[in-house]
Amino acid sequence: MSTPAALCEAGLNHIRAGRYLDAQTCCQQALAIDSNHADTLYLMGLLSFQAKQYDLAVEWIARAIRQNPQPKFLLTLGAALWQSGRREEALKAYEKAAQINPENADLWKNLGDALVEAGRPADALLSFQQALKLDPHRWDVMQNSAIILHRLGRLEEALSCFNLCDALQPNHVPTLSIRAMCLYGLKRFAEALTDTRRAQALDPTNAEPCNNIGILLRSHGRDEEALEWFDRALVLRPNFPDALHNKAVAFTQTRRFHDAFAIYDGLKAADPNDAVAHLGSAHLHMLTGNFEAGWAGREARWKVPPLSTTYPKFLQPLWLGDGAIEGKTILVAADEGFGDTIQFARYLPMLAERGARVVFVVQDALRLLLSDLPGVSHCIATSTMNTSAVNALPAFDIHCPMMSLPLAFGTRLDTIPSPASYLPRPAESRVQAWEERLGRHDKLRVGLVWSGNPNHANDHNRSLPLRALAPLFDVDATFVSLQKDPRPADKATLLERADIIDLTAHLTDFTETAALVSCLDLVITVDTSVAHLAAALGCPTWILLPYTPDYRWLLDRDDSPWYPDARLFRQTKTRDYGEAVGRARDALLPLAFAQ
């Protein structure tokens, strides 16, 4: 008479040969002899899993585990639970398997994979690190760790892992490509380009490395070279969306606007839901002065992460200018950057003028500065906008994202609301405190900002090193730094220059910056939030702009329809800030002389 163990072994052999009905028969015979035979119960679970009967698989394997909680039983149980949508239970099964046999690197690796799928990257990283303690040469685990570290922004740690991956398995194209992006994030451009070129040489028929080389070149202003690589990618993969998007951006930067529009039109025709193409086209319309198409097109941003996930989901209707608002309460929520919020705060009093009560939700750093805007009845910090706070908001009838206000008001180039200043003047006590810090006002006071957020996608175009402003310092003026968080090289330059007053340690928020700006005669800045702050306060503001600037600054003019007291100093085709700074110096000389 066959034993349950023998019948189970026969059933396993049938499974290996693909004879599933024979395997099931053997299992049934085994269970007729011993209904609690753990290996046979597990085998029945495997058969159910193979048939995609996941709930039944869970039942069989759970019975097996009650008899003998083996790690492999728990792993398969976890897989069946996962397929059934019971992810938390699945993770518990994986965790228990690792606890039963904590010296097994595979179990920690499997748990890490499940945690990645569950959207818990930090926990997954801990599991992968445990696996690597047990087996430091597991390339697949090392790569997974590197990818998670990269996504978490822990770039130095990620790079170390990528380097080990390259040592364990040299010339792996995907690893080289991801390591290149990590190097780029660390501002190690030359090394990033070397890795990407190496990946392309190893796999010359792969369009991805070609596209990535183009991205790296474009992000450092080498757009003409980048276009060649996007074209190479498109030869290898015609209609490659990423390469087309990048090519359109490169065309925009080189001012080949007709070609850029043609690409965006093609992308939208191929995929009407391509929100990135709609948004890129909208910004190009804005840059070239077609506000009607631009504002409407910018509504595509709600389909592009992270904006699509960060703006609150209100039950109240969205207002985009349709219908009267007199007697209604409208909630306006800031939805992009600090500079955007300051620029479009001009519309809030206009809502009140139409008879609306305005509730304003604004970034924490700007709340104090903007809480006294005319017409704003209630100002709330964005940090309070969690689920419970949304329910605790003042009652409102309609809402409008702040960056949609120009659309709601039908703003055209000739109807931009542009008062000389629209921000409330800082408290006199704050202004006086800054006057005392600055000392004698016997020369022209000039505030300086030379760089923006280094993580901004266009930072390489808009920022410059402090030393690039050196021609200004020949002018007999008092220069005052408004630059928060200067980069290491700029810190060193600041220490060397006794002719720049640096009191930025006292700039604790935008209200303090506004008070300091109120003490200045002029602000010279690159395209950052301080440019908007100074101009909105009515302080004369000179803005240094790249050859192809952000859409709001338009093209080929030295004034701004948004800010009457702003003056624009643009790069020419050479894309050299030296020329723009030289023109600013020439304009500064007579002002300093007249002081």
Image (cartoon, rainbow, N blue to C red):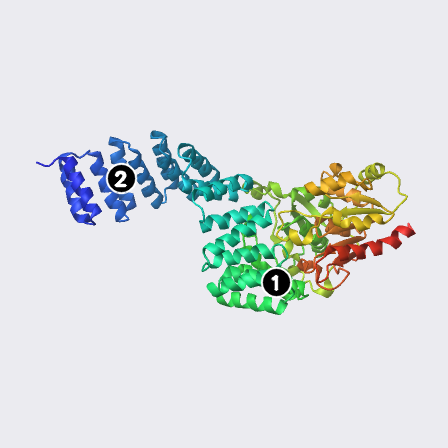
State which mark lies toward you, 2 or 1.
1
Work out whether residue 385 or residue 232 is closer to the camera in this orientation and state it.
232
Against 90, residue 284 (above or below) is below
Can residue 462 be seen in the rendering of this structure? yes
**Residue at 75% across / 59% down in the picture?**
560
**Residue at 56% across / 49% down in the picture?**
192
- Image quadrant of residue 505? top right
Amino acid carrying mark 1 in the image: Glu
Amino acid carrying mark 2 in the image: Glu
- Please state the horizontal and vertical placement of residue 116, each as a whole percent of the image: 43, 42
Is 97 left, or right, of 47 in this rendering?
A: right
Is 173 left, or right, of 450 in this rendering?
A: left
- Please state the horizontal and vertical placement of residue 16, each as a whole percent of the image: 22, 46
- Please state the horizontal and vertical placement of residue 549, each as a whole percent of the image: 68, 58
**Residue at 68% across / 53% down in the picture?**
462
What distance separates the C-alpha of mark 2 from that of mark 1?
Answer: 62 Å
- Please state the horizontal and vertical placement of residue 409, each as a whole percent of the image: 67, 60
Q: Point out which mark residue 188 bears.
A: none
Circle 1 SS class: helix
Residue highlighted by disc 1:
224
Q: Point out which mark residue 59 bears.
A: 2
Farthest residue toward the left?
1
Callout 2–callout 1 Cβ contact below 8 Å: no
Badge 1: residue crowd in 10 Å (few <14, some 14–19, many ≥20): some
- Image quadrant of residue 479? top right
Q: Quadrant of the N terminus?
A: top left
Work out whether residue 516 or residue 153 is closer to the camera in this orientation and state it.
153
- Image quadrant of residue 319? bottom right
